[in-house]
Image (cartoon, helix red, strand yellow):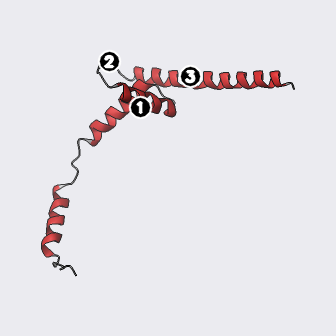
Amino acid sequence: MSDDKQAQSRREAILAEYAEEEAEAAEIEVAEKAAALDVPLNLRITKGLDAQLRQRAAAEQIPTSALVRRLLTGAVQVGTSPVLTVEQVEAIARRIVTEPVVSGS
């Protein structure tokens, strides 16, 4: 096979792979929109954050909006639980009170 034909075959393979990835991304976005996404949210962010979000979304092969929804959902869910429970703080306090003081050398 000549170099031109090899290059053309490679380009066609790359284009086919790209088209498949785009189709998958579109399917994901359609599925997410169908999952009751009925409240639009507009916000302003820095160009740097925008670039980071787009880069990460591209790396994960998902639309940027899907990534932002996932990040916001995770942040809200994580934010509802305390860092330490009352029981954990009390256990730490008991250890501090009961442990002997070690003097430095």
Question: Residue 88, percent across and down?
Answer: 20, 60
Question: Horizontal and vertical percent for residue 19?
Answer: 61, 21
Q: Estimate how packed mark 1 is, as few (under 14), some (14 to 19) or many (20 or more) residues with alpha carbons within 10 Å.
A: few
- Which residue is the site of mark 1? 52
Report which residue position mark 2 lands on.
Answer: 38
Of marks 1 and 3, which one's residue comes earlier in the chain? Answer: 3
Callout 1, which amino acid?
A: Gln
Badge nearest the viewer, 1 or 2 = 1
Disc 2 is placed on an element classified as loop
> Compared with residue 74, is residue 86 higher up or lower down, i.e. above or below?
below
Q: Dot 3: what SS? A: helix
Query: Of the residues tagged 3 and 2, which is closer to the observer?
Result: 3
Q: Bin the neighbour count of mark 2 within 10 Å (Cα to Cα): few under 14, some 14-19, many 20 and up.
A: few
Q: Position of residue 56 (x, y in %)?
A: 45, 33
Identified by mark 2, the residue type is Asp
Residue that numbered label 3 is attached to? 22
Up the image or down, 70 lies above or below 102; here it is above
Distance, label 3 to label 2, CA atoms, is 24 Å
Q: Residues within 10 Å of mark 3 (few under 14, many from 20)?
A: some
Give the residue drawn at x 82%, y 25%. 3
Identify whether 82 is placed above or below 64: below
